[in-house]
């Protein structure tokens, strides 16, 4: 724990930061207030938890994605209904004691605290210990702290703020979240009322402008490539402008990133394998900010180990299934926890998959002189259907991103281990809990999932997590262009992302292009996305990345989405959406118990 005369640290049970910089490790000893930080390395040590906190259990370490956002958007379809907080996320009807939202709130504010600690320590170091030659390095640390503080406040405001600001300043006076601009020096200053939405967004934007300026000339060496950059800050600033419908500033800022960052869309050949732990794809030409993850649980159960820099553990929940050793869907084997979270069937057709459900038939190639196995199954997918399914891929009848994101039973084959056995090629299966249910697709996750190893044997993810990439910038720029009346430019940037999905040159007009902002999309008979290319491209491009929830909320698509998905396996009643409350998560009851200044400031409906 860090102790200073002039600061009080609110939360420090945080994980360490960038994996490729061994100096970025949380110290476990107490240090003297008269000698720390004494060096730049020590100042970097204080900064490290600002990054490492991203892997907290309540954030991208585990709960935020598979147990919160996946269920809120119905990307996933939870089979397990024994977790009340999880069920509330699926129903978009949270209680003020919901553990998932409370843990996110706590972890996000812990991140804010680490940034405030860093900024105070930077001031102390510069005033008392540093040489003038160290000014640029200190400013680079300040820039990272300001970027990360803005990042955490961005998440807090979009999850817990009362409403998004709309064009012309609508909703600027609504309730935002409490702002802590420095580490509280005493108990009294830990009590903060909710700022207005305008004050919160203004603070986020100011931090990002400062971060971009402080990091302007900084180029990180390979060992520190996970750190934020000037372009990370400008990209998030452009996103903040879009999320507050400041179209003019959004266009200027995002175009700066497009023209001057040196970043572009990665080619499809790289894109299709960019989410599963291929280290050659890390920090690529599309990435603006990503979470650096080592495939290492540090000798414990991933983020539950409590040791610095342990890997994340999302994939244990959204693992695909492979056939049983006897070659059946009954007894299918998950490459992680079984019976938790599958893919909602409605997502398959939303990507444009045109075929109905499949049936199992007697395997015409079954060798009855050998035991049934996954390489010699007694029953298989109807060969006629399988041939049609393969043609859908070959002809790109469905959006090719379907196969970037998901794996298809019987058609996809995974080269994976099982309980320590050597890797074997095994067909994908429906989850065992869907075996014998013919009117189900039963596809599994591919993006951010263990597809070549059994995650439950090792308890870790091995993929980096993208927070900001150029596809987001292109589509945000398209939205800002459309918002400011430039539909032609908007459509072109939508098409750039669309072309990449079909492995086409992104800057060349193609037969796959949308011809208008109301053109038909791959989403079959979809009232929400079927004739809205901007919405569809954001849904399809960032499927399973935790981004769609924020688009649903700012575009107020909740009831339409609930109607589209209809049901969820962990709920006994049809999906609904309460527009009066569900776009905002409730401020946790624990915060009301600790912060008297927010009395009476709960979000409407809670």
Image (cartoon, rainbow, N blue to C red):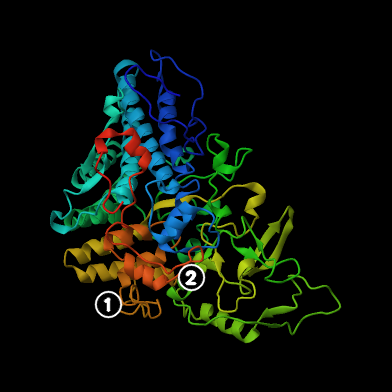
Residue 592 or residue 467, whichever sits in front: 592
Local packing at callout 2 (Cα closer than 10 Å; few below 14, some 14-19, many 20+) is: many
Task: Calculate the distance from the C-alpha at mark 2 to the C-alpha at mark 1.
Answer: 22 Å
**Picture coordinates of residue 427 (x, y %)?**
66, 69
Element class at badge 2: helix
Local packing at callout 1 (Cα closer than 10 Å; few below 14, some 14-19, many 20+) is: few
**Picture coordinates of residue 543 (x, y %)?**
43, 63
**Picture coordinates of residue 392 (x, y %)?**
52, 80
Residue 329 or residue 141, whichever sits in front: 329
The furthest residue to the left: 168
The furthest residue to the top: 34
Residue 585 or residue 155, whichever sits in front: 585
Whether residue 319 is visible to the viewer of this picture, yes or no, is yes
- What is the number of callouts on the image? 2
Q: Quadrant of residue 37 in the image?
A: top left
Q: Are marks 2 and 1 in contact (CB under 8 Å)?
A: no
**Picture coordinates of residue 514 (x, y %)?**
32, 77
Residue appearing at x 76%, y 82% in the figure: 365
Q: Is residue 43 left or right of residue 417?
A: left
The residue pinned by badge 1 equals 518
Whether residue 264 is visible to the viewer of this picture, yes or no, is no
Tag 1 or tag 2, which sits nearer the N-term?
2
Q: Quadrant of residue 490 in the image?
A: bottom left
Seen in the picture, residue 51 relative to 412 is either above or below; the reply is above
Q: Is residue 387 left or right of residue 60?
A: right
Residue appearing at x 73%, y 82% in the figure: 363
The residue pinned by badge 2 equals 402
Element class at badge 1: loop
């Amino acid at each position: 724990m860090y102790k200073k005369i002039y600061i009080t640290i609110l939360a420090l049970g945080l994980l360490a930061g960038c994996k490729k910089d061994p100096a970025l490790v949380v110290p476990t000893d107490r240090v003297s207030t008269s000698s720390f930080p004494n060096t730049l390395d020590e100042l970097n040590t204080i900064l490290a938890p600002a990054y490492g906190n991203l892997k907290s259990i309540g954030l991208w370490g585990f709960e935020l994605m598979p147990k919160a956002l996946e269920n809120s958007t119905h990307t996933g379809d939870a089979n397990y209904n024994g977790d009340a907080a999880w069920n509330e996320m699926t129903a978009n009807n949270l209680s003020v004691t919901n553990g998932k939202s409370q843990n996110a709130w706590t972890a996000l504010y812990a991140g804010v605290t680490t940034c405030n600690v860093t900024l105070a320590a930077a001031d102390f170091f510069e005033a008392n210990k540093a040489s003038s030659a160290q000014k640029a390095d200190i400013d680079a640390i300040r820039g990272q702290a300001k970027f990360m503080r803005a990042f955490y406040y961005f998440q807090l405001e979009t999850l817990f703020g009362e409403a998004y600001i709309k064009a012309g300043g609508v909703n600027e006076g609504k309730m935002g979240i409490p702002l802590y601009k420095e580490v509280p020096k005493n108990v009294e200053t830990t009590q903060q009322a909710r700022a207005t939405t305008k004050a919160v967004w203004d603070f986020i934007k100011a931090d990002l402008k400062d971060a971009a300026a402080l990091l302007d000339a900084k180029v990180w060496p390979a060992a520190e490539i996970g750190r934020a950059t000037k372009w990370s800050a400008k990209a998030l600033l452009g996103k903040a402008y879009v999320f507050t419908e400041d179209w003019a500033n959004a266009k200027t800022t995002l175009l700066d990133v497009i023209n001057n960052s040196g970043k572009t869309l990665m080619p499809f050949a790289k894109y299709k394998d960019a989410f599963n732990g291929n280290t050659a794809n890390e920090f690529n030409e599309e990435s603006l900010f990503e979470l650096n993850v080592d495939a290492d649980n540090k000798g414990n159960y991933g983020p539950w180990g409590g040791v610095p820099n342990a890997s994340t553990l999302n994939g244990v929940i959204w693992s695909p299934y492979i056939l049983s050793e006897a070659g059946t869907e009954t007894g299918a084997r998950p490459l992680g926890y079984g019976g938790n979270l599958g893919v909602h069937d409605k997502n398959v057709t939303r990507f444009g998959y045109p075929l109905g459900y499949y049936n199992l038939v007697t395997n015409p190639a079954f060798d009855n002189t050998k035991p049934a196995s996954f390489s010699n199954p007694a029953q298989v997918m109807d060969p006629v259907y399988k041939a049609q399914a393969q043609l859908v891929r070959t002809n790109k009848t469905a959006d090719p991103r379907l196969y970037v994101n998901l794996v298809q039973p019987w058609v996809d084959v995974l080269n994976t281990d099982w309980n320590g056995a050597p890797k074997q090629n095994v067909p994908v299966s429906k989850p065992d809990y869907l075996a014998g249910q013919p009117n189900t697709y039963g596809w599994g996750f591919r993006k951010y999932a263990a597809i070549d190893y059994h995650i439950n044997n090792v308890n870790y993810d091995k993929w980096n997590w993208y927070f900001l990439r150029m596809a987001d910038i292109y589509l945000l720029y398209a939205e800002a262009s459309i918002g400011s009346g430039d539909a032609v430019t908007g459509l072109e940037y939508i098409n750039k992302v669309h072309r990449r999905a079909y492995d086409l040159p992104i800057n060349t007009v193609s037969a796959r292009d949308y011809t208008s902002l109301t053109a038909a999309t791959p989403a079959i008979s979809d009232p929400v996305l079927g004739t809205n290319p901007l919405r569809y491209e954001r849904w399809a491009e960032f499927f399973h990345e935790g981004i769609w929830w924020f688009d649903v909320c700012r575009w107020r698509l909740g009831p339409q989405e609930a109607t589209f998905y209809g049901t969820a396996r962990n709920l006994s009643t049809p999906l609904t959406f309460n527009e009066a409350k569900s776009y905002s998560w409730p401020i946790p009851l624990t915060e009301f118990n600790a912060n008297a200044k927010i009395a009476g400031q709960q979000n409407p409906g809670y």
